[in-house]
Image (tube, rainbow, N blue to C red):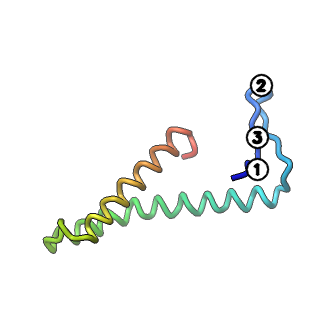
Amino acid sequence: MNRLTHYSEETKSFSSNNSIDEIIEVLAKYENLLDHLLLRQQQIPMELEKLREQGKEKSYKFRELFGEKLTVEAFLALMKTHKII
């Protein structure tokens, strides 16, 4: 990935050789990704609970959802660590 912006600790400012439209387009994609992750963070536990109620804790679907849950949580934790959210 080519960076669109560069932050200078020395001057506390951003610089870029790209147009503002390019930067906004990529920012929108990141925001869409974040929205999706936050939505999945809410949906997955409900889906897992339904499978538990059906006694399907050992099913492929349950394990797949549980893995997705861990991935979403890890990604959101990383974003919090870097003060993105």
In the image, which disc is placed on residue 6?
3
- Label 1 sits on residue: 4
Return the x and y of residue 1 as percentages of the image width and height.
69, 53
**At x 76% / y 40%, what residue is drawn?**
6
Q: Position of residue 54 (x, y in %)?
A: 15, 74
- What is the secondary structure assignment of the residue under circle 3? strand
Residue 54 lies left or right of residue 1; in this view the side is left
Q: Residue furthest left?
A: 55
Number of marks in picture? 3
Name the amino acid type tagged 2: Glu
**Residue 84 percent coordinates (x, y):** 58, 45
Q: Which mark is residue 70?
A: none
In the figure, is residue 61 to the left or right of 18?
left
Q: CA distance from mark 3 to mark 2?
A: 12 Å
Q: Which residue type carries mark 1?
A: Leu
* Disc 1, SS: loop
Callouts 2 and 1 close, C-beta under 8 Å: no
Q: Label 2, label 1: how many angstroms apart (C-alpha)?
A: 19 Å
Q: Is residue 34 above or below residue 55?
A: above
Q: Residues within 10 Å of mark 1 (few under 14, many from 20)?
A: some
Write down the residue under mark 2.
10
Disc 2 is placed on an element classified as: loop
Q: What is the C-alpha distance between the residues marked 3 and 1?
A: 7 Å
Q: Who's the residue at 55% across and 39% down the image?
A: 82
Amino acid type, residue under disc 3 in the picture: His
Label 3 Cα neighbours within 10 Å, binned few <14 / some 14-19 / many ≥20: few
